[in-house]
Amino acid sequence: MAHCTNNELSMSPAAVVMVPLPLQGHLNQLLHLSRLISDRNIPVHFVSTTTHCRQAKLRVQGWNPLAVATIHFHELQTPNYVSPTPNPNSKTRFPSHLQPLCEATTQLRHPVASLLRKLSTTTHRLVIIHDSLMGSVIQDFVSLPNAESYTFHSVSAFTIFLYTLRTISKEFQNITDPEILTNDHLSFEDCFTAEFKKFTSMQHDFAKLNSGRIYNSCRIIEKPMLDLLENEERNRNKKLWALGPFNPVDIKRTTKRKEGK
């Protein structure tokens, strides 16, 4: 009969490490997911730069992250970089002045790897949930026997489906009205700079290391797209979850007053 050591008995059953891309829309989504997971009494470690950890906490709406004791913020440093001023006359709609920040995040690989090694000794199961554009940063998890990673997509399943296929497939045509959606409507032309396309492609190369994908969506909203993506993931022996929407929504119902009252 095997006996557990005191160290093994003190280890948590599981812990989650969140690694967002340090842009507000990406930070915010994974911070809300962190809250949902921490509500299940699972330790959550939120990893980003010093500036962006503080930014995420200051800008979050709908709850007070400081009240959630099981979310641990790890503030890391990136090398200094020069960020140009925004160009309102740019030919693309992408905020290219953020490109140096995206490139600087790749330098977080080694400090993140060090953190993962440390955390892996404190839990039986280490789950890394990372932004799809942070694949290179968490790649060293493969050296840890109790670690696994899941790619988080901050955009809709609809967008990922189109970006993956590039063209409208027969399956897609079967679930849409061709008179409403055309290739012109679904084009990604002029959305991204050449530099960002290169960065995205490099990060997506690490997707083969993950165990599955997570979407900030639900089947009520995107069931057709999620079903098609799930079929693709099943062929690769990977899992897919639609866990959203994460952001807290306060719906206020009002009744119109009748005339004369």
Image (cartoon, helix red, strand yellow):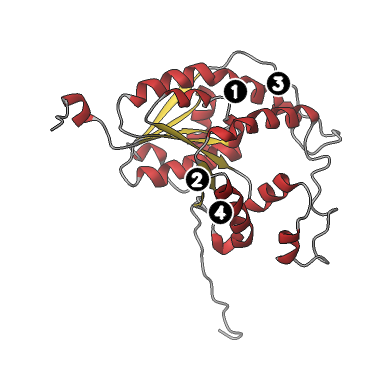
User: What percent of the width, then of the height, locates residue 123?
Assistant: 31, 31
Seen as rendered, the residue at the extreme top is 80
Height in image: 36 above or below 26?
A: below
3 and 2 marks in contact (CB < 8 Å): no
- Say few, some or many: other residues with alpha carbon within 10 Å of mark 1 (under 14 / 14 to 19 / 20 or more): many
Estimate the spatial distance between the alpha carbons at disc 3 and disc 2, rounded to whole Å.
27 Å
- Comparing 23 with 140, the one in front is 140
> Horizontal placement of 95 versus 147: left or right?
right
Three-letter amino acid code at disc 1?
Answer: Thr
Number of numbered tags placed on the structure image: 4
Q: Which residue is mark 1?
A: 105
Q: Which residue corresponds to the image point at 27% horizontal and 34% vertical from the top-left?
A: 12
Q: Which residue is mark 2?
A: 61
Three-letter amino acid code at disc 3?
Answer: Ser
Estimate the spatial distance between the alpha carbons at disc 3 and disc 1, rounded to whole Å.
13 Å
**Of the two numbered discs 4 and 3 in the rendering, the one whose residue sits closer to the viewer:** 4
4 and 3 marks in contact (CB < 8 Å): no
- Say few, some or many: other residues with alpha carbon within 10 Å of mark 2 (under 14 / 14 to 19 / 20 or more): some
* Residue 161 visible, this angle: yes
User: What percent of the width, then of the height, locates residue 250?
Assistant: 49, 59
Three-letter amino acid code at disc 2?
Answer: Gln
Q: Which residue corresponds to the image point at 72% horizontal and 50% vertical from the top-left?
A: 162
User: What percent of the width, then of the height, locates residue 209?
Assistant: 54, 32
3 and 1 marks in contact (CB < 8 Å): no
Which numbered circle lies on residue 83?
Answer: 3
Height in image: 79 above or below 226?
A: above
